[in-house]
Amino acid sequence: MTPALLFARDCIIYSVNVWLLPVECVFNLIESELARRGVQLYPPE
């Protein structure tokens, strides 16, 4: 790939990661609160 395409790809990946960071943080907060309340989120192994 040309350097311009590589740069464009890196910009897209970076922007998606920045956009998803708050979603991931909120998901982790909800998951930890449910675990604190004793809700089983995943089936036992």
Image (cartoon, rainbow, N blue to C red):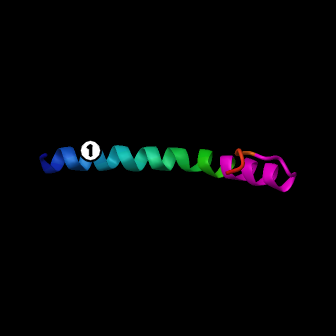
- Mark 1 neighbour density, 10 Å: few (under 14) some (14–19) many (20 or more): few
Q: Is residue 2 left or right of residue 8?
A: left
Q: Is residue 4 left or right of residue 11?
A: left
Q: Is residue 1 left or right of residue 26?
A: left
Q: Is residue 40 left or right of residue 7?
A: right
Which residue reaches farthest front? 45
Q: Residue at x 87, y 51 (%)?
A: 37
Callout 1 amino acid: Ala
Q: Residue at x 12, y 47 (%)?
A: 2
How far across and down, in percent of the image, does residue 4 sit? 17, 46
Which residue reaches farthest left? 2
The residue stretch that appears in magenta: 27-40
In magenta segment, residue 2: no
Circle 1: element type: helix
Q: Quadrant of residue 41?
A: top right
| Residue in front for this viewpoint, 14 or 33 | 33
Which residue reaches farthest right? 37
Q: Residue at x 68, y 48 (%)?
A: 26
Mainly helix, strand or loop, the magenta region?
A: helix
| Residue in front for this viewpoint, 36 or 2 | 36
How far across and down, in percent of the image, does residue 14 sit? 40, 50
How far across and down, in percent of the image, does residue 31 sit? 73, 49
How far across and down, in percent of the image, does residue 3 sit? 15, 51
Q: What residue sits right under mark 1 in the picture?
A: 8
